[in-house]
Image: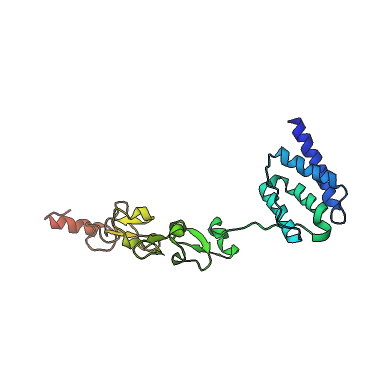
Amino acid sequence: MMRTRALRLLLSFHVSALLAGAQESCPDPGAAAAAEATCKSINNCECTDNNFGDDCASNNDEHCAEIECCASCTDEIQAMWLCEHGTTCGDLTCYTEEHCEDFDEDHCEEHGCEWHEDHGDCHDAGEHCEDFDEDHCEEHGCEWHADDGMCEDIHCEDFDEDHCEDHGCEWHADEQTCEGGDDHDHDHDDEGWSCGTHPADTDGNGVIDINDILNVLGMFGQTL
C-alpha cells in the first residue's frame, strides 16, 4: 500500500516536470518512459502496441488508443507524446466518440441530436424508424414489420389488449382501445371511468353531484 502510494507520488512529480518543459524540449525521455511504464503496471493496463504509421496523424492515433486503453495514465502518455513527437507534431489531440443515444433529454439537443418524446430517447437529428434495418429497428424504439420488410413507428392504436402494454402503451378498458401517453388527452378517475361516462353521472357534466343522486333515486321511485 505504502509502496504504491510512493510510486504514485513519484509519478506525479515526474509528470509535472515533464509537462512543464516538454513543449520546448523533453528534459528526460528516460524518466518519461519509466513513468508511463510504471503507471501502466500499477493500473494493470495491458495495451496493444499499435503501429498505425510514421506520420503525425498516425502517431497521434496510436497515443490516443493508449489513452483509451489506460485512461488512468493519460498524463503519463501525454508526457511521453511530447517527448517523442511534441516538437514535430504539436499537442496530442484525442476526440471521444459520442452517440446521440448516450444523452438524456436535458443534453440531447445541445449535442446536435433530436429528442423523441414518444420513445423517450435521443436520436440523430432527422433519424426516423424507416431508416433502420431489422437488426437495429427495435433498439431505436420502433417496430419491425416482417410482412412489409421495413421498420416503422409504433402506433398504440394498432394493438389489442393482449399486446398493448408489451409495446409501452396503455390499455383503456372503458374505451376498449390501446393508447399512448401523448395520444390520450383526457383524464380518468380512480375506477378507470373516463370523464362523463360514469353511470352515476346522469347529466354528463363530469361530476357526480346532488342532481345525479336525485336522478338515480328517481329511477327507482325514491326521494330524499
Residue at the image position 72 percent from the left and 39 percent from the top: 41
Q: Which residue, as the protein is rendered here, is positioned at the far bottom?
A: 126
Q: Quadrant of the N terminus?
A: top right
Question: Is 177 on the left or on the right of 55, as rendered?
Answer: left
The image quadrant of residue 60 is: bottom right
Q: Is residue 154 above or below residue 21?
A: below
Residue at the image position 21 percent from the left and 61 percent from the top: 202
Q: Which residue, as the protein is rendered here, is positioned at the far left?
A: 221
The answer to which of 65 and 78 lies nearer the viewer is 65
Q: Which colour scheme is used?
A: rainbow
Question: Is 113 on the left or on the right of 150, as rendered?
Answer: right
* Residue 223 picture location, percent across and down: 15, 54
The image quadrant of residue 168 is: bottom left
Q: In this view, does 20 lie above or below 133?
A: above
* Residue 93 picture location, percent across and down: 73, 58
The answer to which of 80 and 14 lies nearer the viewer is 80
* Residue 82 picture location, percent across and down: 81, 54
Badge count: 0
Residue at the image position 34 percent from the left and 63 percent from the top: 147
